[in-house]
Amino acid sequence: MDHLAYDLGIEFKKSKDIGITHPTHQIEFLGIQLSTYPIVEAYPSSIKIAKITTLIHQHVPKHHISYRELETLMGKLSFLG
């Protein structure tokens, strides 16, 4: 693969070559941890906490919340949990 990329003039960052020299079941893509065994996706803890805090702060000041907003909130919290 590296030879083909080199022939085409494409350069890869060495820091991005995770799994090339040593096979792995887990990579990080767009801030999400992806695992092939078992097949799961997960946010790092710091991102989870920040997202959950933001979601809660958006909804706490409201005196009323629609059923649809509650469903959305619960779905997001469930995904992040």
Image (cartoon, rainbow, N blue to C red):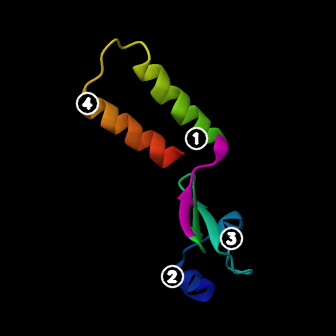
Q: Residues within 10 Å of mark 1 (few under 14, many from 20)?
A: some
Q: Please state the horizontal and vertical placement of residue 26, each as a whole percent of the image.
A: 64, 68
* Circle 3 crowding by C-alpha within 10 Å: few under 14, some 14–19, many from 20: few
Q: Which amino acid does label 2 sit on?
A: Leu
Left or right of residue 71, residue 35 in this image: right
Camera-near label (3 vs 2) is 3
Type of the residue with mark 3: Ile
Q: State which tag comes first along the sequence, 4 or 2.
A: 2
**In terms of secondary structure, where does tag 1 sit?**
helix
For the magenta stretch, what is the residue range? 39-45
Residue at 51% x, 45% y is 80
Q: Name the residue under label 4.
A: 67
Q: Residue 18 carries which label?
A: 3
Labels 4 and 2 touching (C-beta < 8 A) = no
Q: Which is nearer the N-term, disc 1 or disc 2?
A: 2
The answer to whether residue 38 is magenta is no
Could you give the CA–CA distance between mark 1 and mark 2, rounded to whole angstroms?
A: 39 Å
Q: Earlier in the sequence, mark 3 or mark 2?
A: 2
- For label 3, the SS is loop
Write down the residue under mark 2.
Answer: 8
Q: How far apart are marks 3 and 2 (CA)?
A: 21 Å
Q: Which amino acid does label 4 sit on?
A: Tyr
